[in-house]
Amino acid sequence: MKKLLLLFVMMLTATVAAWADYTVVDGVRYEIVTYTSPEQAYVVAPESGVYTGAVTIPATINYEGNDYAVTQISSGAFENSTITSLTLPVGLQYIFSSFTGTSLNSLTIPGTVRFLGSMGDCTSLTSITFAYDGIDGITDEYYWSYGQGAIELSYDCFTGCTNLTEINVDRPLYNNGAYYTALFGKATKATFGPHATNIPKACFYGVTTLQQLTISANVTEIETNAFKQATLPAGYAFPFNQIKKIGTEAFYDCKNLPAAVDLSAAEEIGDQAFMSCTDIQSLTIGTCNLSSGAFSYCTNLSSLTLAEGLTDTGDSNFQYLDGLTTVTFPSTLKRIGWGAFQSCPNLTIPDGLPAGLEEISGMAFNQCAKVNVTLPSSLKIIDQCAFSNTGMESVTIPTSLTDLGDQAFSYCEKLKTVSIPYAETPINLSYTFWNCTNVESITIDRSFTIPESTTAFSGSVDKTEVVIGPHVTTLPPYAFYEASFKSVTLSVNLASISKFAFLGTTVPSLTLPNACTEIAYRAFDGSYIDNLYVPYLTPIALPTEDIVVLFNYSNTKLWVPGGTMALYQAADGWKLFENMDDWSY
């Protein structure tokens, strides 16, 4: 709506120019505009030649006995002029593209100006000031819609001002230009005064010439790309403790940031806001809304404190921090986001995870080789690969947990013990402990499921002992698919073994409990069980479908209760075992 209004003003100006009145006052030519209310005067180019010397534009001019407020400098008004100075009045509202080729060295924009067009190739301009004067007297909605008294700067406003080095800002700025082109590309000195509230987008994008920077206490917003790949003055203490909003990539790869950054006042931190800022060594974050990737690749960041009140780390915000050694979590934290601390190889969590934590999202601590924590009893979600490749030594799945993602603890080489205590709801295990080859003890007393053609454990035939507790009454399909164990002790209450439960499983011996009266087809297909002990005085019925691959009949020795061998040698399925013997039951 704002741009449409501005376009309407420009079109209307062009339409009526053919019959407009003109006058010259003190050497400056004006267009008298009578189609507006109130009637106004616009500064225009002279009929011939260009303006020269010192030029002062008054707030009003008199024409035929009437006073007209000067509200606009029209396009081309000072193009290629040789003016040495230009004084603009409070009350001026629009400055269109008027200065290409002008010899002007410095310019002050009054606080009442709402729009500044492209300065074109104004290569002589070295200093510009955005004054505050007169802002408080303007109340219309258009003027305030970009922020409190903000001036809109056109696309590529200062791109051609290749010698513009000094910037003085005492009001909010709205940059309507590109995100990837610096607003002040050659700045050496920049001052944001007491009435400035923001550093606009791409303000110093890629600027490496800044020698002096002053930011007043009222600046609370750093917009998108404002200091992206910029170099701050050496030793400058950026006032982060007053900043409330930091835009996307605002400080991406920015140099000369302070070693200690305190963002306790921040309410919003955008995507990749500080990515690759290698000067930061310690960081404090308050109760803000964290987007994604905000501090990734800050490789020298060693200490991180998340303040009380923060509930969510956001996603990917602290990835690839080689130097991060400690993080302190608030008790209020509920969620650790996706990839939040991925690939932080030296990270430790000395105070542990907060007691009220409910979700650890996917990849949260993936490849954090030193992370070894106790899972809090409040957890409801651990997503895929959350602790993959970590230093976890013992894992007890909280009874509150209802969602356990793929490979949640895969490739944990230091993991020794796994416990899944009883809870009413089943838990899904999908490659959960895959390639944890040093696990010594696995205890499961909770019903569980395994997705088709997947597994939960790798195990080790030399180390891993599995105990299935009394609350597990069914071994699900693929329960121990392609796993290797030293021993497996089944629950005394186990009633059934589902298809493919021991598909490809390696274990020296296995004893079926007396309660287990149902063995599904291909339950032991391809298994490597040296000795199978059964307690049934009367052989239980086996499924007829694919019965020839129900067990590994040639490699597994069947042990049957004493005195029952003849029954087993005659029973369908059982009689296929090539090696059978008695055992005392």
Image (cartoon, rainbow, N blue to C red):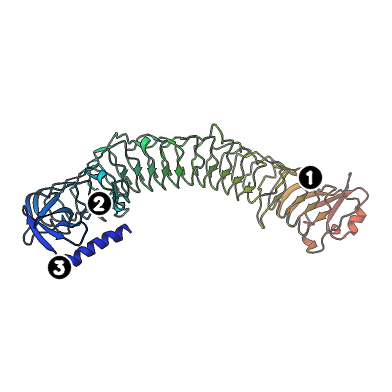
Farthest front residue in view: 65
From the viewer's perspective, is the residue at label 3 or at label 2 nearer?
3
Q: 356 left or right of 583?
A: left
Q: Which residue is mark 2?
A: 114
Residue extending farthest right:
563
Q: Secondary structure at mark 3?
A: helix
Q: Earlier in the sequence, mark 1 or mark 2?
A: 2
Quadrant (top left/top right/bottom left/bottom right) for the C terminus: top right
| Residue assigned mark 3 | 18
> Mark 3 or 2 closer to N-term?
3
Asked whether 62 or 431 is in front, the reply is 62
Marks 3/2: CA–CA distance: 26 Å
SS state under label 2: loop
What secondary structure is found at the residue carrying circle 1? Answer: loop
Q: Quadrant of residue 108?
A: top left
The residue mark sitting in front, 3 or 1, is 3
Query: Where residue 491 is drawn, which disc sits there?
Result: 1
Circle 3 Cα neighbour tier, 10 Å, few/some/many (<14 / 14–19 / ≥20):
few
Q: Residue at x 70, y 41 (%)?
A: 421
Q: Is residue 274 left or right of residue 524?
A: left
Amino acid carrying label 2: it is Arg
Q: Horizontal placement of 545 versus 437: left or right? A: right
Q: Where does residue 186 sit, x and y in percent of width and height?
A: 22, 46
Question: Observer-nearest residue: 443 or 46?
Answer: 46
Asked whether 390 or 577 is in front, the reply is 390
Disc 3/disc 1 C-alpha distance (Å): 97 Å
* Amino acid on which the number 1 mark rests in the picture: Ser
